[in-house]
Amino acid sequence: MSRTALSDAASGDHCIVVEIASEPAELKSRLYALGIIPGSALQILRFAPLGDPMQVKVGGSFVSIRKSEADIISVDIQ
């Protein structure tokens, strides 16, 4: 396993969320509401043609997040 920012993961990667930075607090709160919390499993599905945003699967949901938002999420790539 290798620890990295979610924004550095590649399409098809399976990741476990390790940590979400505490700032900005409103973004952290939004990610928690989407189910992206420490310990959750993510799968990187695809990137938009210009590389931003990225689509991830968390639980049974498909979520699109910006790479700038993904920068604050630390993951272990499986």
Image (cartoon, rainbow, N blue to C red):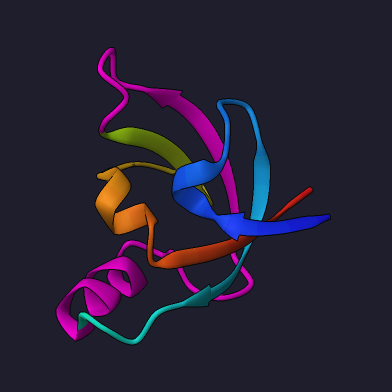
| Spot occupied by residue 15 in the image (x, y as percentages of width and height) | 66, 51
| Spot occupied by residue 57 in the image (x, y as percentages of width and height) | 48, 41
Residue at image position (32%, 24%) is: 51
Q: Which residues are magenta?
A: 25-52
Going by the picture, which residue comes out furthest to the right?
Answer: 1
| Spot occupied by residue 54 in the image (x, y as percentages of width and height) | 35, 34
Q: Is residue 53 left or right of residue 58?
A: left
Going by the picture, which residue comes out furthest to the left?
Answer: 26
Residue at image position (16%, 79%) is: 26
* 42 falls in the magenta region: yes
Instruction: Find residue 40 and report its image quarter.
Output: bottom right
Residue at image position (50%, 28%) is: 45
Quadrant where the N terminus sits is bottom right
Q: Is residue 75 left or right of residue 47?
A: right
Who is closer to the viewer here, 39 or 75? 75
Going by the picture, which residue comes out furthest to the top?
Answer: 49
Who is closer to the viewer here, 34 or 22? 22
Numbered marks: total: 0
Q: Is residue 42 left or right of residue 14?
A: left
Residue at image position (38%, 34%) is: 55
Q: Is residue 22 above or below residue 33?
A: below
Q: Is residue 77 above or below residue 24?
A: above
| Spot occupied by residue 14 in the image (x, y as percentages of width and height) | 68, 42
Instruction: Find residue 28 and report its image quarter.
Output: bottom left
* 48 falls in the magenta region: yes
